[in-house]
Image (cartoon, rainbow, N blue to C red):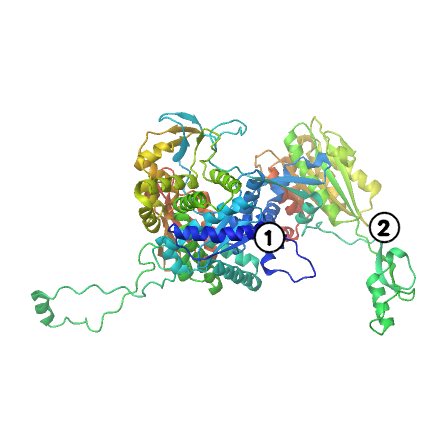
């Protein structure tokens, strides 16, 4: 008895099930729902991971299978059941459904084990989802020297590189020329059409984004990681959105240093907090390398807010200088679970600046689960509109 | 080759079964691939509506199969004619066994009264009905989109056990008006009272009183929602009723599992013994297969914390035929369901022979309890009450359309799992489109009201 059907013969209607699995169809739908729900909770799921150091391009998320809920009785503290085997009343043994070890030989289990799925997501995909509606605040098209040129398709030609042969178009030409049906078509050089590319100039939107991190002793490891994770997702998202984007990483304690990106995400420090050194370093770099007239400058500063009291005036000045040049300055206050809500030295500094009409925003980031809230706060069009109102 | 041999056996086994006292509608046999068998087990019907929850069961089934558990030999659907699907991977011996087994089921479903009653309701063509439901839902998906249809199925399938099998499948709505109070006996006093002048202002016929909805707590939630949801679309109601019809079909299968599987196993063993036309080797192979099917759960480990319904039912039927004779057995298979069957025919002696015991599980410890036959019956039957679901009833619909559900915790012994119940309320609320409340008790036994939204 064979289940294979010859393709030239009409399909035996009784064998339709060879072609189609309803179980697999419903399983795929389940999978889709899991992905959707993972996607909705993505910020929480991805935030805690060691992504920023690993360099891996995928994240694995363990998920449970979805449960279709029914009314069920609460689990009883004590339940009764019927079993079979040689036992005496009063015998006591361990409940195999409660013990982990499966290898041991004991009474057969009562409940089926739970299955976990391991879904793999590409970081690029995650960034795509997260950044669907995000954009840099206050971005202005500044036409400067770095105009971009882009190759665009434009028309067809009879000559061209082999790789740009347009098969569909060529075939149409063949059909047009051939006229009479039935003849075996053969291509001639006349039929071939090649896509043409044209260079088009485009005003570039340049942006330089500064990430300034306080790595002083008062920042705990967790605070630092929180800040870096926020920076990581911000960088990933901005790179996706903007092609000509320059990122500059600066860390400070009582001094400030510029770091290349990979080292920045490893950096830790100790000592006091003098925010003005960081601001000064940023200003210095802006003036050395970027012309604020032709480039959008952004600063994102992460700190626990405990700036040294004696630095107050200098920090205010330094920040004001940057704000004058920058399209936007953002302040992320990382604090371990304490919702001090920006009531800190640095927090007040940014609040003053905002009250004076500066383009600035602040966010108190208390938890890894809130990272996406922070990203949304700075980069979504709606939340900024609300803030501006 | 073996196909024709088997066809020949089928006819001879059928004749033998009929001679032995079984009566069944003709059965159409079809050999299908293992993958299809697995899907029938997952969906319960050969063609059934799509829903992601079946996908979850499908994966569990796949895992089970890969771990070497549970091989499926046959699935049979009652009806006239009945449909039996056999795994195309079955060997000849297995198919001989399975054929006899299927005839046992066919006899059971034709003669058991619970099956008969449900078949009168659902008709003898459940396989075709389920396929047409599947098509109806496919059309709904095309017309209204997957998301909306899925929301309806989420709710309807979550309530699939909540039907009232004692009511008709095609049940009409409650009477619109309350019955007028019954006239009292026409005694001397009433005559004289009626002869008095009518009091001023009491003129005109008494206004009819609207009956409350529901007039009594309603267990058939699928029906109730389909009939009385304030803002449901008609296609949504149809889906609820389609799910309900399939539940009516599944109920007897569920409520007679021990009897039905036991009966089929008893008959395949008996018919094989009596079928002298089967070659020796095929017989031995088939009997080997039989003992795999009816062995106790986890026979290789000494103690199992569960029962194999095939094994229990098979042993009970053997005992019944042995002690009471075939006539009595045929009457029992016609009249009982699992509740009556276990309570009446699982004797002390048999329970001891089979080494059945009762245990209590607490804090990760299993303690074997004192033997008590009545309590053992109830422990075996407990998961079967009310289609295996808690007793949740619709109690009242408020003037603003809010639905009040109530859980009868005194009947079930404890309150509901709150997390799951909330999710079910969420499913339901999306269809009811007004608030839905549910009263149950919490761990401390205090009354608790859940609500959605």
Q: In the rendered structure, which disc, 1 or 2, sits on the residue that comes first in sequence?
A: 1
Contact, CB < 8 Å: mark 1 with mark 2?
A: no
Badge 1 and badge 2 in a common chain: yes
Residue B292 in percent (x, y) is at 49, 38
- B55 with respect to B157 (left or right): right
**Which residue lies at the image location 32% right of the left edge and 48% below the top edge?**
B327
Is residue B453 among what the camera can see? Answer: no
Q: Is residue A86 left or right of residue B56?
A: left
Q: For this rendering, which residue is in front, A81 or B2?
A: B2
**C-alpha separation, residue under disc 1 versus residue under disc 2:** 56 Å
Taking the spot 27% from the left edge, 64% from the top edge, the residue there is B178
Neighbour class for label 1 at 10 Å: few (<14), some, many (≥20)?
some
Q: Position of residue B110 (x, y in %)?
A: 39, 55
Q: Quadrant of residue B62?
A: top right
Q: Which residue is mark 1?
A: A21
- Element carrying mark 1: loop
Element under disc 2: loop
On the image, the x and y values in percent for residue A113 come to 52, 37
């Amino acid at each position: 008895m064979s289940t294979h059907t010859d393709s030239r013969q009409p399909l035996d209607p009784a064998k339709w099930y060879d072609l189609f699995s309803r179980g697999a169809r419903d399983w795929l739908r389940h999978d889709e729902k899991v992905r959707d729900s993972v996607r909705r909770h993505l910020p929480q799921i991805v935030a805690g991971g060691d992504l920023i150091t690993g360099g891996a391009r995928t994240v694995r998320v363990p998920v449970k299978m979805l449960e279709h809920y029914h009314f069920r009785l609460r689990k009883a503290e004590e339940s009764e059941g019927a079993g079979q085997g040689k036992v005496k009343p009063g015998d006591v043994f361990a409940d195999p459904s409660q013990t982990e070890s499966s290898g041991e030989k004991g009474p057969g289990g009562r409940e089926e084990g739970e299955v976990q799925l391991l879904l793999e997501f590409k970081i690029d995909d995650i960034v795509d989802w997260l950044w669907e509606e995000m954009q840099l605040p206050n971005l202005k098209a500044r036409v400067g020297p770095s105009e971009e040129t882009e190759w665009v398709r434009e028309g067809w030609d009879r000559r061209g590189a082999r790789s740009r042969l347009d098969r569909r178009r060529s075939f149409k030409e063949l059909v047009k020329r051939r006229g009479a049906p039935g003849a075996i078509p053969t291509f001639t050089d006349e039929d071939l059409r090649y896509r043409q590319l044209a260079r088009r100039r485009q005003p570039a939107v340049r942006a330089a984004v500064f990430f300034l991190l306080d790595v002083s002793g008062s920042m705990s490891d967790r605070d630092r990681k929180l800040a870096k994770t926020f920076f990581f997702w911000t960088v990933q998202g901005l790179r996706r959105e903007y092609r000509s984007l320059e990122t500059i990483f600066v860390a400070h304690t009582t001094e400030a240093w510029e770091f290349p990106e990979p080292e920045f995400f490893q950096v830790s420090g100790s000592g006091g907090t003098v925010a003005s050194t960081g601001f000064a370093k940023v200003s210095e770099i802006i003036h050395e390398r970027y012309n604020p007239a032709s480039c959008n400058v952004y600063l994102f500063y992460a700190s626990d807010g405990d700036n040294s009291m004696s630095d107050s005036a200098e920090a205010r000045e330094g920040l004001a200088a940057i704000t004058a040049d920058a399209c936007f300055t953002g302040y992320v206050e990382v604090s371990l679970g304490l919702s001090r809500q920006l009531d800190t030295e640095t927090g007040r500094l940014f609040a003053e600046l905002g009250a004076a009409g500066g383009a600035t925003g602040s966010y108190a980031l208390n938890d890894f689960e809130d990272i996406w809230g922070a990203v949304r706060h700075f980069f979504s069009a709606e939340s900024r509109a609300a803030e501006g109102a | 080759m073996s196909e024709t041999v088997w066809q020949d056996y089928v006819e001879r086994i059928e004749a033998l079964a009929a001679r032995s006292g079984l009566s069944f509608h003709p059965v159409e046999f079809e050999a299908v691939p293992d993958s299809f068998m697995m899907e029938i087990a997952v969906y319960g019907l050969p063609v059934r509506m799509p829903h992601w929850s079946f996908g979850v069961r499908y994966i569990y089934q796949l895992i089970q199969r890969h771990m070497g558990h549970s091989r499926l030999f046959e699935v049979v659907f009652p009806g006239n004619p009945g449909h039996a699907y056999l795994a195309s991977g079955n060997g000849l011996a297995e198919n001989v066994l399975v054929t006899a087994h299927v005839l046992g089921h066919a006899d059971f479903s034709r003669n058991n009264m619970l099956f008969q009653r449900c078949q009168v309701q659902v008709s003898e063509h459940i396989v075709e009905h389920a396929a047409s439901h599947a098509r109806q839902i496919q059309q709904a998906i095309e017309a209204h989109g997957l998301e909306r249809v899925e929301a309806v199925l989420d709710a309807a399938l979550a309530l699939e056990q909540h039907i009232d099998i004692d009511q008709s499948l095609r049940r009409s709505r409650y009477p619109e008006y309350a019955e007028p109070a019954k006239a009292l006996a026409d005694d001397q006093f009433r005559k004289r009272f009626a002869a008095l002048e009518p009091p001023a202002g009491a003129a005109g016929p008494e206004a009819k009183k609207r009956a409350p909805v529901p007039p009594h707590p309603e267990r058939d939630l699928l029906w109730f929602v389909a009939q009385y949801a304030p803002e449901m679309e008609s296609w949504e109601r149809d889906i609820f009723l389609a799910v309900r019809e399939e539940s009516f079909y599944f109920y007897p299968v569920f409520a007679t599992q021990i009897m039905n599987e036991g009966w089929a196993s008893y008959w395949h063993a008996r018919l094989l013994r009596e079928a002298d036309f089967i070659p020796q080797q095929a017989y031995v192979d088939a009997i080997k297969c039989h003992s795999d099917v009816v062995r106790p759960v986890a026979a290789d480990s000494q103690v199992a914390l569960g029962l194999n319904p095939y094994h229990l039912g098979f042993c009970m039927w053997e005992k019944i035929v042995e002690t009471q004779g075939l006539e009595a057995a045929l009457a029992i298979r016609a009249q009982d369901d699992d509740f009556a069957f276990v309570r009446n025919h699982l004797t002390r002696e048999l329970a001891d022979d089979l080494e059945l015991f009762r245990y209590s599980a607490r804090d990760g410890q299993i303690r074997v309890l004192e033997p008590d036959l009545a309590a053992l019956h109830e422990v075996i039957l407990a998961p079967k009450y009310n289609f295996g679901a808690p007793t949740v009833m619709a109690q009242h619909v408020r003037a603003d359309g809010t639905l009040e559900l109530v859980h009868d915790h005194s009947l079930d012994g404890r309150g509901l799992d709150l997390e799951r119940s909330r999710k079910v309320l969420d499913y339901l609320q999306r269809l009811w489109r007004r608030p839905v409340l549910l009263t149950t008790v919490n761990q401390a036994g205090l009354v608790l009201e859940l609500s959605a939204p």
